């Protein structure tokens, strides 16, 4: 592990929709205007916007990465035009069961129709990098370990079969991580993992499977947004991480603890 952390802000978005959308407040949402403001501000401040795959293929200074959890059709309607305007791309994470109208957890389904397979392929062809958000959006630390392994493995197989390419990234639903989940994600072939641990300072390469992110909401504007993007915010979250983190890589999965007891 490097002694000096890298300032690599990874922004964590969820839904993009106008405030007039009847389900705007049912989800963690930003408007297209706020997304446009963020990208414009980043570019004006000299940030290069890349995907996770682009950054780790050729690490550079002052790179920001935009990631979107629970991606549904609203992303096509409201986010894609903003990305097209700025000619940048993001990492996006659809839930497998959403595509098949199956059960998913810890998330209201009102107003967020799932992407079809054809839409996922189209987004990939447009340059958005698609990663696994598992099958049913359950907390990997809280469900049986074998179920968690199946969710990580099967969602990767599904996306790779659909896209005809390697799927390198995983976004752990609800931030549920532990040593056994991360080890299995690496074993099954993921190269990069993103968590819900807060902050923009990353110890690389150690943190590559549990990268921290900045939690973006509709009040993340002005000075608030500038502070999130600063290394000072990252440092504050880094030193408080041992006290705030609900799930840590140092934890074991409950099933692993039982097996070893």
Image (tube, rainbow, N blue to C red):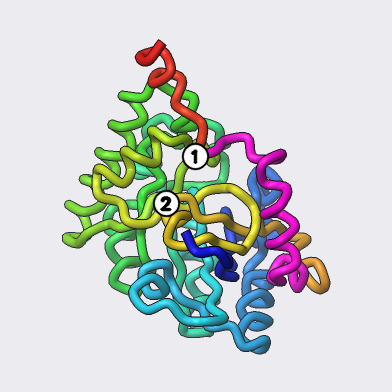
Left or right: where does residue 221 sit relative to residue 191?
Answer: right
Seen in the picture, residue 56 relative to 117 is either above or below; the reply is below
Q: Position of residue 55 (x, y in %)?
A: 42, 74
Badge 1 marks a residue whose secondary structure is loop
Q: In the rendered structure, does residue 122 fall within the stretch colored magenta?
A: no
Q: In the rendered structure, does residue 231 fall within the stretch colored magenta?
A: yes
Does label 1 or label 2 sit earlier along the sequence?
A: 2
Q: Residue at x 39, y 36 (%)?
A: 181
Q: Residue at x 33, y 74 (%)?
A: 57
Left or right: where does residue 2 sit relative to residue 157?
Answer: right
Badge 2 marks a residue whose secondary structure is helix
Residue 32 vs residue 128, the one in the foreground: 128
Q: Residues within 10 Å of mark 1 (few under 14, many from 20)?
A: some
Seen in the picture, residue 54 relative to 200 is either above or below; the reply is below
Name the residue carrying label 2. Answer: 209
Task: Using the image, tell me which numbered label, if any, was put on residue 240.
Answer: none
Q: Which residues are magenta?
A: 225-248
Q: Residues within 10 Å of mark 2 (few under 14, many from 20)?
A: many
Q: Position of residue 60 (x, y in %)?
A: 47, 81
Q: Position of residue 208 (x, y in %)?
A: 43, 57
Seen in the picture, residue 13 relative to 39 is either above or below; the reply is above
Taking the view exactly as shown, the residue that stands out farthest to the right is 223
If the image is split into quadrants, where does the C terminus sit? top left
Which secondary structure class fits the magenta region best?
helix
Q: Residue at x 46, y 76 (%)?
A: 50
Taking the view exactly as shown, the residue that stands out farthest to the front is 3
Left or right: where does residue 49 sit relative to residue 31?
Answer: left
Contact? badges 1 and 2 (CB < 8 Å): yes
Q: Residue at x 40, y 18 (%)?
A: 255
Name the residue carrying label 1. Answer: 249
The quadrant in which residue 234 appears is: bottom right
Q: Position of residue 180 (x, y in %)?
A: 38, 33
């Amino acid at each position: 592990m490097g002694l000096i952390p890298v300032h690599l802000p990874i922004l964590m978005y969820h839904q993009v929709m106008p405030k007039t959308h009847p389900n705007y407040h049912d989800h963690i949402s930003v408007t297209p205007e706020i997304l446009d403001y963020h990208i414009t501000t980043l570019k004006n401040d000299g940030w290069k916007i890349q995907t996770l795959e682009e950054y780790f293929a050729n690490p550079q200074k002052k790179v920001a990465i935009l990631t979107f959890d629970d991606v549904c059709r609203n992303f096509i309607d409201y986010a894609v035009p903003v990305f097209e305007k700025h000619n940048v791309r993001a990492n996006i994470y659809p839930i497998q069961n959403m595509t098949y109208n199956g059960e998913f957890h810890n998330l209201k389904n009102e107003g967020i129709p799932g992407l079809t397979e054809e839409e996922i392929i189209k987004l990939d062809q447009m340059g958005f990098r698609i990663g696994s958000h598992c099958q049913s959006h359950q907390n990997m630390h809280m469900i049986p370990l074998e179920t968690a392994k199946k969710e990580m493995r099967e969602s990767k197989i599904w996306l790779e079969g659909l896209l005809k390419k390697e799927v390198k990234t995983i976004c752990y639903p609800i931030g549920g991580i532990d040593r056994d989940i991360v080890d299995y994600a690496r074993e099954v072939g993921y190269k990069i993992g993103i968590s819900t641990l807060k902050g923009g300072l990353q110890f690389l390469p150690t943190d590559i499977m549990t990268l921290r992110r900045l939690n973006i909401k509709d009040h993340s504007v002005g000075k608030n947004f500038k502070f999130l993007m600063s290394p000072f915010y990252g440092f504050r979250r880094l030193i408080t991480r041992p006290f705030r983190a609900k799930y840590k890589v140092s934890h074991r999965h409950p099933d692993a603890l039982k097996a070893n007891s």
